[in-house]
Image: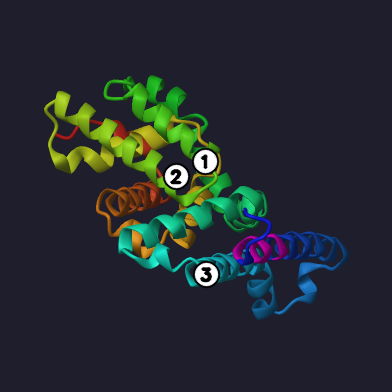
Amino acid sequence: NDKLSLPGYVYRKLIGEVKARAESRKETDMKQTVNAESPEEMATRTRAVRQDVHGIIKYITATLLEVRPGFCSSPRITEMSATAVETLVFGEVYDYVMAEIVAETLEKDKCLESKLINLRTEAEAAGVQVDTHISEDAMQSLKMITSQHSVAEKLRCSVELLEYVSNEGSNANMGADCLLKLVCQHLALASVPNLNAECVFLEEFARDQQLLQGKEGYALVTLQASLHFLNASQKLVDDIFHEDD
């Protein structure tokens, strides 16, 4: 953010360009119909903001490391620098990125939310108690994911979610194989909007270095598997709340 530094200058110019391009695309989208586009043109347009953001994160990080060679003194400091750049960038353009992803996953999220909206009512009608193994701390961590605007913070909330759910399972003397089912229960009951979009954001922008730290990678894989199961299930009450024999 130093206005006199090369990284600061590059940062401000590129962020301004990304915002201007995103606003220009909005105006273009309102003027032209989707039917006039080829599949290739549509795919490029619907990923345009993400492509821009990937580019500026890479370029700003490279510029920072070039003019501040001390940040390359260890992998840990380099990773911290990359995370700092990413956090600054998403602080400016997060809404543009998420709007693009939400539009991409709109139908899938609508379908999931339609299944979840009456879940409690259906469970009560079937005589199933859905809150037996629900952790309020886990629910809070899950709901916090949507309020965070950086990959690092979203992953931190995901790790906390898994830790609270795991503790809940241990307290109930449930085996590790029940973890996925418990995570599904929390996702189903949390009323978190755009779950698929949140997962796509993490898949898109989480760096290998973040995922290789262990907990973060495991948390993302578990969320992906749980969300895939919820999207595919046609009988959620039976699939995730009925006790196994």
Give the alpha-carbon distance from disc 3 to disc 2, as whole Å: 29 Å
Q: Residue 70 versus residue 51: which sits nearer the camera? A: 70
Give the residue number, with chain letter if any, for mark 3: 67
State the SS at label 3. helix
Query: Taking 41 as reference, is 134 above or below it?
Result: above
**Residue tagged 1:** 148
Count of numbered badges drawn on the protein? 3
Choose the circle earlier in sequence order: 3 or 2: 3
* Residue that mark 2 sits on: 154
Residues at discs 1 and 2 in contact (Cβ within 8 Å) = yes
Separation (CA) of disc 1 from disc 2: 6 Å
Answer with mark 1 or mark 2, whichever residue precedes in sequence: 1
Which segment is the magenta one? Answer: 7-13
Is 221 left or right of 89, judged from the image as shown?
left
Q: Residue 51: percent from the left, percent from the top?
A: 60, 69
Residue 84: where, in percent of width, then height? 49, 53
Amino acid type at image mark 3: Val
Q: Amino acid at mark 2?
A: Lys
Q: Residues within 10 Å of mark 1 (few under 14, many from 20)?
A: some
At label 1, the amino acid type is Gln
Q: Quadrant of residue 147?
A: top right
- Image position of 193 (left or right of 126): right
